[in-house]
Image: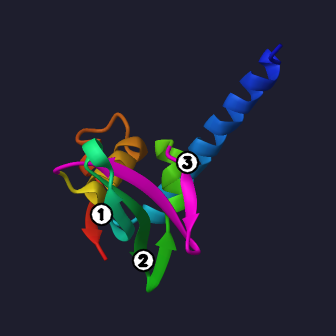
Amino acid sequence: MHDINGLIAAKKARLTDKDKAISYVKEILAGDDKPVIYTISRRTRSAGQNGTSVDLSLFYLKDSAAWNLTYYAGLIIGLKVKNLDGYNVINNTGGGMDLGFDLVYALSSYLYEGEHRAGYKVSHRWL
């Protein structure tokens, strides 16, 4: 038998982690009128009928520092973050589209949910 109170508590904890991650990333991006998140492709492979599978890391450059946002983006979007050769990566799969843009668009949509064109508040570039 499952402990329903434990499941509810675990779900609330995850929501709290997501909310904290959103606040943290928004704090990092604060003051930048046109923030750009950079993606690095760590590994690319065929995903069969699903197109291409790419392991990506996400970075934001501010004040001569690189902020690794991969872990927080995974929490916010709800995607698994794994370690690949010492790097945190998020796997994104698809065909016929820019998978780095897709990931940053999704992150921006969560960060600015409810705002006009939320997915476009943050721009994307490849490193």
Give the label on residue 62, or none.
2
Residue at (35% x, 46% y) in the render:
106
Callout 2: SS: strand
Residue at (57% x, 51% y) in the render:
21
Sequence-wise, which precedes: disc 2 or disc 3? 2
- Residue ID for mark 1: 33
Asked if the residue under mark 1 is in contact with the one under mark 3, i.e. CB atoms within 8 Å, the reply is no
In the rendered image, the residue lying farthest to the left is: 96
Q: Where's the N terminus, which quadrant?
A: top right
Asked if the residue under mark 3 is in contact with the one under mark 2, i.e. CB atoms within 8 Å, the reply is no
Q: Is residue 25 magenta?
A: no
Q: Which residues are magenta?
A: 79-96
Q: Where's the C terminus, which quadrant?
A: bottom left
- Residue ID for mark 3: 75
Residue 48 visible within the image: yes
C-alpha separation, residue under disc 3 versus residue under disc 1:
24 Å
C-alpha separation, residue under disc 2 versus residue under disc 3:
21 Å
Q: Is residue 116 above or below residue 55?
A: above
